[in-house]
Each structure stands twice: as structure tokens, then as C-alpha cells.
Amino acid sequence: MGRRPGVPALRATPPVPTGPGATPYRERMRYDRIPSHSPRTSPASGSSRDTTLPGGAGTADAPASAVLPTVRRPYAAAFRALICAAAVTGIVIDLAVGSPLRVLSYFTVQSNLLVAVAFGWSAVRAWRGRPPLPARVTGGVLLYISITGLVFHLVLANSSSGFSMTGDQTVAVTGWRTVSNQLLHTVTPLAAALDWLLLTRPGGLRPRHAAQWLLYPLAYFAFALIRGALLSPGTTARYPYPFLDVAQHGYAGVLTNAVVFGLAFYVLALTITGLDHVRPCLRGPENRISSPGASGLK
């Protein structure tokens, strides 16, 4: 009887071997389906995509992480662990010597909490040889801690700024507060900037990130006003910063201050994204601590 064109001819089923050492039929059928030219290679690149099964019986697809060696970055991990420790130490000191709820209401403490989480997580990933955190995340943390450092040194600690807190006894810098003040306002901002310049691959940030990062300062502005409205007049640190003090400047004045600071923060965010595309790559690709396509904290 003839067969229709295009229909392959049926092969007779080979006899199933029996006896000691015989390969089960189903296992032989599975091995027979594997091409004899294994490991398979890509026609375009010729690179191997398979690994040999145990005993050399055949090949099976394997993820790249199972083939490529893990590159650990101990120096980056150690530096980021120190940054995390500095932020945690400053926060713990402030919590120990002040009212926890009041301490946690400051942008300084909140931004340093973000630093502790981001750099602690990044230190673990660098130590284990994992990919870096997304550039959008690390760039946002850099912006927030930069705001903390710049606003403190240029505005709050500047007696001629009009919003100085140097004479405020509720935040008097004495004793252990001197240590936490330097850690949270100077050490962590500078260390985060150094990490970005020396250990982070450039080119991962986009202009749209600058607007996205402002969502947190905007949310903090709303939080500060709502908190101040809920607290009774005369409460210590009712408004965390002088430029947010509705009792002193009124809502119109506070809104004006918010617009001015918001525009300054946006310019700073755009500056960070712009510098990210022009700053040099200080190490060659062979010495970088992440793959060429990665960005963010390495």
C-alpha cells in the first residue's frame, strides 16, 4: 500500500532489549531525540548553549548563570557596608537621645534610612556577585541624601540664610548629637557621592527619572503640613524645618518656599542625570564590577 506524499514513512519499532545493563526503551527514545552534534551551537555565533548530561548521554539547556563565573566585588561591598553602618549609627544615636516619633519625622533621618537600606542591600549583592541595583533606585537615593547634605550646610547651618536652625534649642548639637549630626549630614552624603563617582557605571540614568524622584519630596511636604496641622500649637518641632513652619510664614509663604526648593531639587536631579552621561568610566570594562550593560550600584 502506498503512502501519501509528505507523510514520513513509519519505522519499525526496534525490539526492547532485556537483561542486565540494558537501557530502558523510554530512556533510549529520549536520548535518540538529541542531535549527534551536541553540544548545540547557535548558527550565528557558534556559542554553546547546552551542557552535557551526566555520563555524557546528551545535552540540556542551562541558564547563563550556571555557566558564567560569579564575580564577587569585595571592595565595593566593604565600602557600601561602611556607608550603611554610618547611616545606621547616626539614626540610632538620634533615636536614643531624642523622641523617636519626632526624630523619624525629619527628612534627614528618612533619607538616611533609605541610604542604609539601599547600600546595605547593594553591599550584600556585591559580595555575592549579584547584579547591581537599578540605576533609577540608586540615583534617587543619591538625590535625597544630597538634598540632606546641601540643605543642611547651605540653609539650616547657615545663619544668614533666613532659615537657620543654629539657635534652635530643640535640635541643639551637643554630646552624641555632634557625632550623629556629622554622620547624617556630612559623612553619608559625601560617601554616597564617592560611591556614585567611583563604583557606579555611568549612563544608566534618564531625564525622566528626575521628575519621578521628586514624588518623595512632594509626599514629604504634604506629610509635614498634615502632621503640623494635627499637632497642637506650641508642640516641640511641630514643623520639622523653618521653611515649612506655617505658624511663622503662613500657608502662602510655605507654598512659595516649597516651590523654590522644589525647583532647586529638580535642577539638582537633572544635574545628576546629566553628569551621569558625561562623567568618565574610571575603570576599563575588564575591571568593572558589573557587566557592561548594567548600571546602578555595582
Image (spheres, helix red, strand yellow):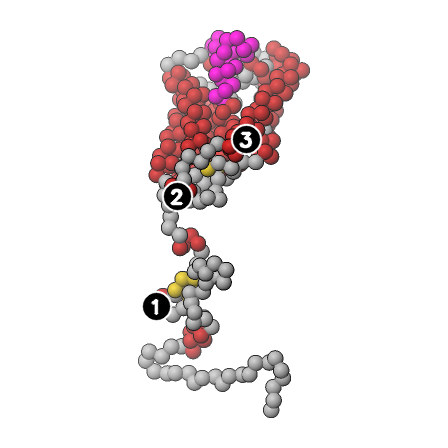
Q: In this view of the protein, which residue sits in the foreground, 236 or 259?
A: 259
Disc 3 and disc 1: Cα gap in Å?
55 Å
Residue 81, numbered label: none
Residue shown at the point (36%, 68%) measured from the top left: 56
What type is the residue that disc 1 sits on? Gly
Percent of width and height locating residue 179 = 38, 19
Q: Is residue 83 above or below residue 7?
A: above
What type is the residue that disc 2 sits on? Glu
Quadrant including the N terminus: bottom right
| SS at circle 3 | helix
Residue shown at the point (45%, 63%) measured from the top left: 41
Residue shown at the point (39%, 16%) measured from the top left: 178
Percent of width and height locating residue 154 = 50, 15
Say whether marks 3 and 1 touch (CB < 8 Å): no
Report whether 96 appears left or right of 5: left
Which residue position is annotated with label 1?
A: 55
Q: Quadrant of residue 216?
A: top right
Residue 286, numbered label: 2
Which residue position is annotated with label 3?
A: 274
Disc 2 and disc 1: Cα gap in Å?
35 Å
Q: In this view of the protein, which residue sits in the foreground, 163 or 20?
A: 163
| SS at circle 2 | helix
Report whether 257 appears left or right of 53: right
Q: Start and end of the magenta stretch?
A: 148-170
Earlier sequence position, callout 2 versus callout 1: 1
